[in-house]
Amino acid sequence: MNGNLAEKLEPVKVMERNNPIVDEYFRAEKLPQIWCPGCSNGIVMHSIVKSIAELGWKKEDVVIVSGIGCSSRAPGYLDFNTLHTTHGRALAFATGIKMAKPELHVVVITGDGDAAAIGGNHLIHACRRNIDITTIVFNNNIYGMTGGQYSPTTFTGDFATTSPYGNIDRPFDIVNLAGAAGATYTARSTAYHMTQLTKFIKKAMEHKGFSLVEAVSICPTYYGRKNKKGAAPQMLEFLKDSFVNARAYERLDDEKKAGKFVMGEFVNIEKPEYTEEYAKVIDRFRGENNG
Ligand SMILES: Cc1ncc(C[n+]2csc(CCOP(=O)(O)OP(=O)(O)O)c2C)c(N)n1
Ligand code: SF4
Ligand SMILES: [Mg+2]
């Protein structure tokens, strides 16, 4: 940097903090984070950490794995065993970790593009296997990191840099997709409803088997601007007004249902878990060969 300019600029101050969760679970030297002002990634990241804190998991027993994207930067700020992998492949790495060390708690942080476009195949097969991994999809309906291309969750008619005349694709419903593929716990909440979001993430983490929580998020910089959704406060207001619990949704007449989205738990069932089934095969093989 130009020497004179450097002298004029105030050094960046590390945030003054008085938050035990931040002190315990964040890498202070990596803060402040570099997401855009108003981005909701910090809210969802906080929900994840709060869930782990409330569960009382030891940091050394937790592995957080991500792919590539704005949301996938989160593990860099978190003081656990963390792995920032390649685009779409977080679940492949996470599966390897869980198979090698089933006693660890494995959590995947991924975006809508990372999880459902390039990583879509890994997602459906992880669901099908019911491997004990918790996946949090930060769904902001856009590729944030690469400048606002449409993703598999961008709504029909919405604008993106790759759909300047309106998106003609129909979006995936991520929780339905995961449930149909075999996930044994699925839920959806939003960055506005952080208390509920944390409750679902905690339940997903406690669940044995593949669990997925869709955290509906906001990207004011690309999705918001391209679709004239206003700034971050207006986008959060939209989440507040448009997402309703299933029971409340059922009570609405058809006219009022239009434009509303259901949040809540969708699947919560027990099925054989993959690493346990695999261990049984190993035990059987050893038994047969020792007998
Ligand atoms: C193999 C590969 N293809 C494409 C990219 C470029 N790329 C990086 S992040 C990204 C999209 C991220 O979108 P999403 O997962 O929704 O995360 P967000 O940034 O919105 O949080 C793409 C296409 C890449 N890094 N690697
Ligand atoms: S581009 Fe969007 S998703 Fe990425 S940091 Fe900015 S607001 Fe968040
Ligand atoms: Mg995205």
Image (cartoon, rainbow, N blue to C red):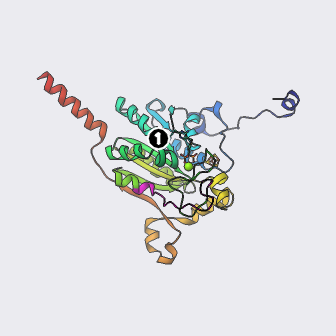
Q: Nearer the viewer, residue 145 or 139?
A: 145
From this view, report whether residue 143 is shown above or below residue 262: above
Does any portion of residue 92 appear in the rendered image? yes
Q: Quadrant of residue 247?
A: bottom left
Q: Which residues are magenta?
A: 160-176
What kind of element bears circle 1?
A: strand
Query: Amino acid under label 1?
Result: Val
Horizontally, residue 132 falls left or right of residue 276, namely: right
Dominant secondary structure of the residues highlighted in magenta in the image: loop
Closest to the observer: 80 or 182? 182
* Residue 163 covered by magenta stretch: yes
**Number of numbered discs:** 1
Q: Position of residue 46 (x, y in %)?
A: 56, 44
Label 1 beta carbon less than 8 Å to ligand 1 = no
Horizontal and vertical percent position of residue 87: 51, 39
| Residue 221 spot, x, y in % from top left | 67, 52
Looking at the image, which residue is at 40% across and 57% down? 176
Rendered residue at 44%/59% (across/down): 264
Residue to which mark 1 is pinned? 108
On the image, the x and y values in percent for residue 216 come to 53, 55
Mark yes or no: residue 207 visible: no
